[in-house]
């Protein structure tokens, strides 16, 4: 969503590139693409499958945001057993009526014991940290990449976490 | 699925909503839609991993649940902290929080309408999926797209002008705010008001034109009655930031009024289900089967007796005419309700920015741990949000419960999808536009699935039609 904070400049990006797949765009299956921005950490079998597929289809993979780069708040459950986390939400929460079931049907994903950042499972070409990532940095990285330049993130402002 | 007797259509995940979801449409032997299940596939474990932390960290941690309504999480959280401390926020701190909260609602509603939903109204449900997005709108209606983008920008800029950040802001703290609003920034925000009002009104005219031209669809679109819950002020006026709760029934009779949100457990219970990470909350007095209620803009307008501001009130009266004095049940009217609310938000922001106290430096009061338990509540863009903390005398959290807006619409979303599927999906003859309508039934609720399972990140979708033998008849993937 922080991508949208580049505001009207999204229309400039749209001039330089076709946005083929994105939460705000209905697209078909991910074709081979030049650049993919990936948000979020890998928490489940579905995420893993997804990121492996994305890596295969993308020339450049950019980890966008602290969750993708270092798991951030998403990884805070790593200090606890997964079952404890699930029980707290689906069994013992004080608003639960005690008559429910644990989410376990074949239609729900299988959660991994530990949450990992993208670079633990795939090669990541560039990172844009931040929670949220800074809109100007996103625009800077995109416009550098779209003009076949390697973005320079050595500036401390651009490499801001949190 | 071990039950292969029946045909199954899967839409996975749903595009143009926030978060990651899948729908299974179950067909019977005749190819008629039997039911639909809305699977939400995210889980993060906030209730557990916050245990042992200091309660005062919560207004900073919990906004990370969501990138769209982080401020509502901060507000609900900070109110729970203030209950623990027995503390009242400072007058100006409270005004600033209210203003930031309005800003978030404006940008969230702008996103929902202009970025995510307007492509359906302006380009058509059956138009080319590759162009059915905000950039497609920008090509055909550049002015509308630009205004929509700028309306969202205005909402975000309110946060930025006060705290220096657009998303996951810092500074909402027990006792008020950590940052004041400078006179320069106040003026810069005031400049936006006329444009913001005009843009919301443009949105209203788009939706009204669409409703006029598609009367039959709009009125028949997932229109089953339900209960509604929303926050109201002392006179029953629509309220987002600080008020009491009201429940109404299908006929519009008030079931509960001026309920203190701290009593939420007496009125709301939830049940976990096997096929989704999103729980099913219900109105406790009526039980799981009968007690489903809706929250969010449509619910808030249905429960409210009036709106706070002039232009929004005029529009509100027109909205009320749709229901002829009864609640408006058509799910499609969520869009209209959202825009009326956005209009009210812009007008209220205008009033706040004109209040001389808004730039005062008396922004924060201070307290310390006084009570073990705190419950905070506000109206997030998608509905009522509750944070409930229990602490030990050192202030460490021993229990955290979060009841999220989208979760409360979960039972109704599921029912709405079933209704729309019955209307538009016939057997294995599945057309792109039909599936989009099933999805748009969900999109009416503007669900933030990240929030409701406290998860973050978006995923693409795939659709599967499975026949009686469990064979996939039809498959399509969308991003």
Image: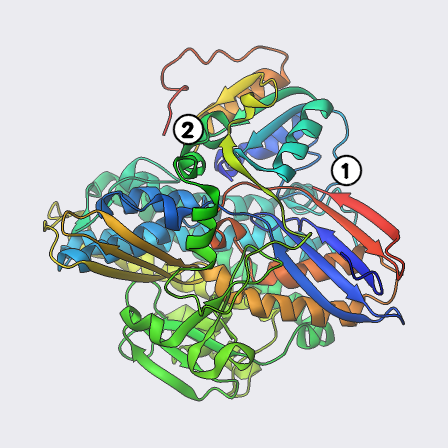
User: Looking at the figure, which quarter contains the C terminus of chain B?
Assistant: top right
| Classed neighbour count for the residue bearing mark 1: other residues with Cα under 10 Å, few (<14), some (14–19), many (≥20) | some
Q: In front: A12, or B132?
A: B132
Relative vertical location of residue A43 with respect to residue B331 in this rendering, above or below: above
Which corner quadrant holds the N terminus of chain B? bottom right
Q: Position of residue A33 (x, y in %)?
A: 72, 25
Q: Earlier in the sequence, mark 2 or mark 1?
A: 1
Residue A130 is labelled as 2
Residue A29 is marked as 1
Picture mark count:
2
Looking at the picture, how far across and down is residue A30, in whole percent? 74, 33
Q: Front-most of B152 and B274? A: B274
At label 2, counting other C-alpha atoms closer than 10 Å, the crowd grade (few under 14, some 14-19, many 20 or more) is many
Q: Residue, x 63% and y 56% (percent of image)?
A: B39
Residue B401 occupies which quadrant of the picture?
bottom left
Mark 2 vs mark 1: tell me if same chain: yes
> x, y percentage for residue B435?
76, 58
């Amino acid at each position: 969503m922080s991508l949208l904070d580049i505001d009207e400049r999204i229309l400039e990006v749209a001039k330089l590139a076709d946005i083929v797949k994105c939460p705000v765009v209905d697209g078909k299956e991910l074709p081979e693409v030049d650049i993919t921005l990936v948000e979020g950490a890998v928490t489940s079998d579905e995420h893993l499958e997804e990121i492996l597929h994305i890596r295969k289809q993308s020339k450049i993979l950019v980890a966008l945001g602290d969750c993708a780069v270092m798991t951030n708040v998403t990884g805070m459950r790593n200090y606890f057993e997964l079952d404890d986390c699930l029980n707290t939400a689906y069994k013992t929460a004080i608003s639960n009526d005690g008559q429910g079931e644990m989410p376990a049907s074949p239609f729900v994903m299988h959660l991994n014991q530990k949450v990992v950042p993208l670079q633990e499972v795939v090669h990541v070409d560039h990172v844009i940290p931040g929670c949220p990532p800074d809109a100007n940095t996103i625009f800077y990285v995109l416009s550098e990449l779209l003009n076949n330049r390697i973005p320079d993130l050595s500036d401390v402002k651009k490499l801001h976490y949190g | 699925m071990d039950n292969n007797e029946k045909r199954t259509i899967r839409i996975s995940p749903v595009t143009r909503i926030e978060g990651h979801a899948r729908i299974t449409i179950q067909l019977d032997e005749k190819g008629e839609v039997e039911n639909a299940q809305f699977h939400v596939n995210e889980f993060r474990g906030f209730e557990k991993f916050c245990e042992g932390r200091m309660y005062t960290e919560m207004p900073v941690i919990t906004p990370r649940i969501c990138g769209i309504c982080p401020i509502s999480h901060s507000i609900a959280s900070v109110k729970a902290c203030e209950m623990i401390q027995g503390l009242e926020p400072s007058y100006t701190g409270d005004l600033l929080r209210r203003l930031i909260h309005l800003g978030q609602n404006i940008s969230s509603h702008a996103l929902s309408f202009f970025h995510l939903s307007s492509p359906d109204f302006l380009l058509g449900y059956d138009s080319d999926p590759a162009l059915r997005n905000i950039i497609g709108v920008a090509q055909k209606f550049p002015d509308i797209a630009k205004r929509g983008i700028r309306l969202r920008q205005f909402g975000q800029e309110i946060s930025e002008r006060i705290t220096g950040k657009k998303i996951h802001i810092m500074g909402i703290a027990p006792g008020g705010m950590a940052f004041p609003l400078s006179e320069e920034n106040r003026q810069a925000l005031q400049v936006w008001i006329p444009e913001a009002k005009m843009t919301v009104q443009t949105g209203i005219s788009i939706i009204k034109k669409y409703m006029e031209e598609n009367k039959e669809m709009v009125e028949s679109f997932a229109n089953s009655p339900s209960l509604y819950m929303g926050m109201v002020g002392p006179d029953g006026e629509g309220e987002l930031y600080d008020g009491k709760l009201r429940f109404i029934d299908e006929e519009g009779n008030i079931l509960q009024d001026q309920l203190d949100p701290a009593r939420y457990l007496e009125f709301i219970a939830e049940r976990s289900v096997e096929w989704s990470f999103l729980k099913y909350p219900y109105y406790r007095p009526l039980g799981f089967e009968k007690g489903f209620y809706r929250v969010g803009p449509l619910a808030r307008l249905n429960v409210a007796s009036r709106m706070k501001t002039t232009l929004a009130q005029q529009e509100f009266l027109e909205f009320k005419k749709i229901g002829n004095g009864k609640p408006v049940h058509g799910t499609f009217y969520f869009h209209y309700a959202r825009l009326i609310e956005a209009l009210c938000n812009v007008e209220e922001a205008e009033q706040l920015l004109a209040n001389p106290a808004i730039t005062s430096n008396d922004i924060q009061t201070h307290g310390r741990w006084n009570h073990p338990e705190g419950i905070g509540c506000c109206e997030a863009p998608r509905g009522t949000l509750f944070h409930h903390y229990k602490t030990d005398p050192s202030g460490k959290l021993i229990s955290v419960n979060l009841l999220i807006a989208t979760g409360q619409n979960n039972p109704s979303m599921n029912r709405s999808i079933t209704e729309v599927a019955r209307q538009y999906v016939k057997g294995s003859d599945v057309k792109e536009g039909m599936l989009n309508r099933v999805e748009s039934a969900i999109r009416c609720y503007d669900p933030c699935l990240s929030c409701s399972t406290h998860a973050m990140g978006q995923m693409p979708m795939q659709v599967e039609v499975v026949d009686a033998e469990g064979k996939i008849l039809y498959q399509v993937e969308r991003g």
